[in-house]
Image (cartoon, rainbow, N blue to C red):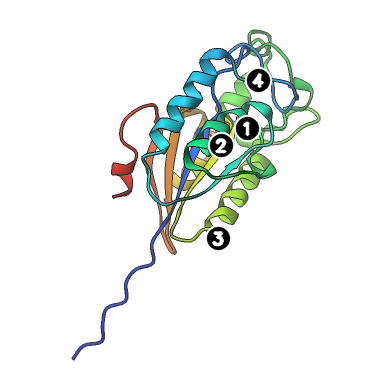
Amino acid sequence: MPPAARKAPARTVLLLVRHGLTPTTGKVLPGRAPGLHLSDDGRKQAEAAAARLVKVPKIAAIYSSPLERARETAAPIARARRLPIRIDRGLLECDFGAWTGRKLDELRKKPEWDVVQRHPSTFRFPGGESFTEMQTRITGALARLVAQHPGRVVVAVSHADPIKVAVAHALGMALDLFQRINIGTASITAIAYGRTDTSVLTVNSMDGDLAALLA
């Protein structure tokens, strides 16, 4: 008789959640400055994300960026799943250096803004992080989560740019194209990591049945 076929190992699915709305979303580049909390609408978004994620089977762990807006988004998810929040600095927002706290309307007038949008792989924020370093950091963090939770589902609450560059990496896109990806507040992006393959299941999902993606 032919030997029994080996069952392919289950893939690990990471559900990447962007934090909810804050009073400065779309107005200021807050970066890693402490003290920024969710707005009332942001808290409602976080609760809605939790209501979606409570229906997803096999969630093994919930991780969050250490910034307040991320932890506050993770909190209702953790309550709904009865799991602790694990803080991972690899999920942090980009370090915008001297641009931290600046108004976006002002930054868009700078000549460097075109570089940020069109050739981000060549740009480093003054006194801060480069986009290449950010991508290396976030993909390294996600790889650790995959290794720690093989075959399971993991929630990771982070920020727009780190999630965008993680999606670009998973798709094999050049880093210079990552700004074409949109990640809205409290949206959920799902990436499945296998032993030899990676699949992007959904990007910037705002509603719908996430459990169906994992079936």
C-alpha distance separating marks 3 and 2 = 18 Å
Q: Nearer the viewer, mark 3 or mark 4?
A: 4
**Mark 1 or 4 closer to N-term?**
4
What is the crowding at mark 4: few (fewer than 14 residues within 10 Å), some, or many (at least 20)? many
In the image, what residue type sits under mark 3?
Ala
C-alpha distance separating marks 2 and 4 = 14 Å
C-alpha distance separating marks 1 and 4 = 9 Å
Image location (x, y in percent) of residue 214 = 33, 48
The image quadrant that residue 124 belongs to is top right
In the image, what residue type sits under mark 4?
His
Please tell me the numbered disc located at residue 157.
Answer: 2
C-alpha distance separating marks 3 and 1 = 23 Å
Q: Check disc 1 and report the residue beneath it.
A: 71
In the image, what residue type sits under mark 1?
Arg
Quick one: 173 or 71, which is closer to the camera?
71
Q: Check disc 3 and report the residue beneath it.
A: 147
Answer whether labels 1 and 2 touch (C-beta < 8 Å): yes
Q: Nearer the viewer, mark 3 or mark 1?
A: 1
What is the crowding at mark 2: few (fewer than 14 residues within 10 Å), some, or many (at least 20)? many
Residue 152 can be seen, yes or no: yes
**Does 125 appear above or below 26?**
below
Please tell me the numbered disc located at residue 37.
Answer: 4
**Mark 1 or 2 closer to N-term?**
1
C-alpha distance separating marks 1 and 2 = 8 Å
Q: Dot 2 lies on which element?
A: strand
